[in-house]
Image (cartoon, helix red, strand yellow):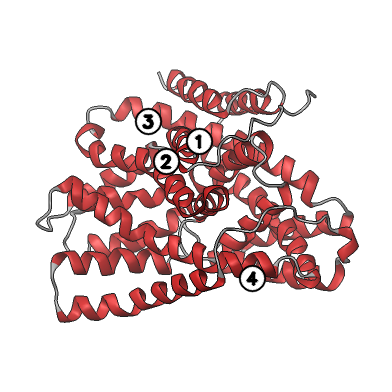
């Protein structure tokens, strides 16, 4: 196997540089939140070395416990740690705007380009399998170095597949933390070397206070003054605050809040759902499509951007609120032991996701398997850039659909 690529020069500490890095990811990160974790690991752990493998796994463990889109929260946290508050905003803009703009425009184009999109979408699902397989292999080698943690990974995989719900995943992570605290000795754990996030405790407390204040006050304001924008703000802020599991979990709740209330008809909703699967970036950008389809008195594109900001606002507040406390907590010996157990379980969660739903929906036959194998070899052994592998595999999926 070839040696890992040399780290890139560390001249990327400005918000603009962070924006450009995440913009490329926002244009090429197909495959949903699980695949995003693989893309982020390749970019920020292996290539740019912004943080260590363990620090990255710690961050995944944290965001699994927070409501909202986990991959976007990880991106916000990475930008925050790299370039402060401006970096957090730049990371979110770069990763989110490409898919949001595409979804606002996609409704009028989806019908006439449906066949082309279907074939390319199949290729994108296949490359997501290769990306996640690469991430599982690399993370398992670092985070499961002994028999105990390999066993914890395997048990977590089995448990998640048998209890296919967010609460099942949460129980697995909590159980792994308890087992790690009891059975993993601190001397077995390598020290995490990430720099603390540039957030003070005061700023963290203010962010958490604002998060809970908006969650409590927006429903009251919408009830007292039922203006369309206030009702929309209450709906999308509540969705961003209370949806655990991220990704596809948000879609049925959005259907209940928009279709059942008459804001969007079911045909438009389903068209937007299909478009969301065909674009890169976070699935929460579906909110931009729904906002553009609503009639609130604002132009469609402006209302789409408004809904986008509101649904992601809780993620910003939660990440800023918990980071100063998280960085201190995870350096304590017992917390580090618990995190070592959680990290092993995180690998198990990724392995379970690799099988269900990714493998079961993307690998339909020998041709799909060959395409996924080619993508995996290109990523792991040839060290080709993920964006190039994504485009090539999408083209392969389109060719197979002809």
Q: Closer to the N terminus: mark 1 or mark 4?
A: 1
Tell me where residue 335 sits by quadrant. Answer: bottom right
Q: Which residue is mark 2?
A: 94
Q: Nearer the viewer, residue 363 or 241?
A: 241
Q: Closer to the N terminus: mark 3 or mark 4?
A: 3
Looking at the image, is mark 1 or mark 4 nearer the viewer?
1
Looking at the image, is mark 3 or mark 4 nearer the viewer?
4
Q: Marks 2 and 4, how far apart in space? A: 33 Å
Looking at the image, is mark 2 or mark 3 nearer the viewer?
2
Q: Marks 3 and 1, how far apart in space? A: 28 Å
Mark identifier at residue 21 = 1
- Reply above or below: 203 against 248: below
Q: Marks 1 and 2, how far apart in space? A: 8 Å
**Classed neighbour count for the residue bearing mark 1: other residues with Cα under 10 Å, few (<14), some (14–19), many (≥20):** some
Q: Which residue is mark 4?
A: 171
Q: Marks 3 and 4, how far apart in space? A: 36 Å
Q: Are marks 1 and 2 in contact (CB under 8 Å)?
A: yes
């Amino acid at each position: 196997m070839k040696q890992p690529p040399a780290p890139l020069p560390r001249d990327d500490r400005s918000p603009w540089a962070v924006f450009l890095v995440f913009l490329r990811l926002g244009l090429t990160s197909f495959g949903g939140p699980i695949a995003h974790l693989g893309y982020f690991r390749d970019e920020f752990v292996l290539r740019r070395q912004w943080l260590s493998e363990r620090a990255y796994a710690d961050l995944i463990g944290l965001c699994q416990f927070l409501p909202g889109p986990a991959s976007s929260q990880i991106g916000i946290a990475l930008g925050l740690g790299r370039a402060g508050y401006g970096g957090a905003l730049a990371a979110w803009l770069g990763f989110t705007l490409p898919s949001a703009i595409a979804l606002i425009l996609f409704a009028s184009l989806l019908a006439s380009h449906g066949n082309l999109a279907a074939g390319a979408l199949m290729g994108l699902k296949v490359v997501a399998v290769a990306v996640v397989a690469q991430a599982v292999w690399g993370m398992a080698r670092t985070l499961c170095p002994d028999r105990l943690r390999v066993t914890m990974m395997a048990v977590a995989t089995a448990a998640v597949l048998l209890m296919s719900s967010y609460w099942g995943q949460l129980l697995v992570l909590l159980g792994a933390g308890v087992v790690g605290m009891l059975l993993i000795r601190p001397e077995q754990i390598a020290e995490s070397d990430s720099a603390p996030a540039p957030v003070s405790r005061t700023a963290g407390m203010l962010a958490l206070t604002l998060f809970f204040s908006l969650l409590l006050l927006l429903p009251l304001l919408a009830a007292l003054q039922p203006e369309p924008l206030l009702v929309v703000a209450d709906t999308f802020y509540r969705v961003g605050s209370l949806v655990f599991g991220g990704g596809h979990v948000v879609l049925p709740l959005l259907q209940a809040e928009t279709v059942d209330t008459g804001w969007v008809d079911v045909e438009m909703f389903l068209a937007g759902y299909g478009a969301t699967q065909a674009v890169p970036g976070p699935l929460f950008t579906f909110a931009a499509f729904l906002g553009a389809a609503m009639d609130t008195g604002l132009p469609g594109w402006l209302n789409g951007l408004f809904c986008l900001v509101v649904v992601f606002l809780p993620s910003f507040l939660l990440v800023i609120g918990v980071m100063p406390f998280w960085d201190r907590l995870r350096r304590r010996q017992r917390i580090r032991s618990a995190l070592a157990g959680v990290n092993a379980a995180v690998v198990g969660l990724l392995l379970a996701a690799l099988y269900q739903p990714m493998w079961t929906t993307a690998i339909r036959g020998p041709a799909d398997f060959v395409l996924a194998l080619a993508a995996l070899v290109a990523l792991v052994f040839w060290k080709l850039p993920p964006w190039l592998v994504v485009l090539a595999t999408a083209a392969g999926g389109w060719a197979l659909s002809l």
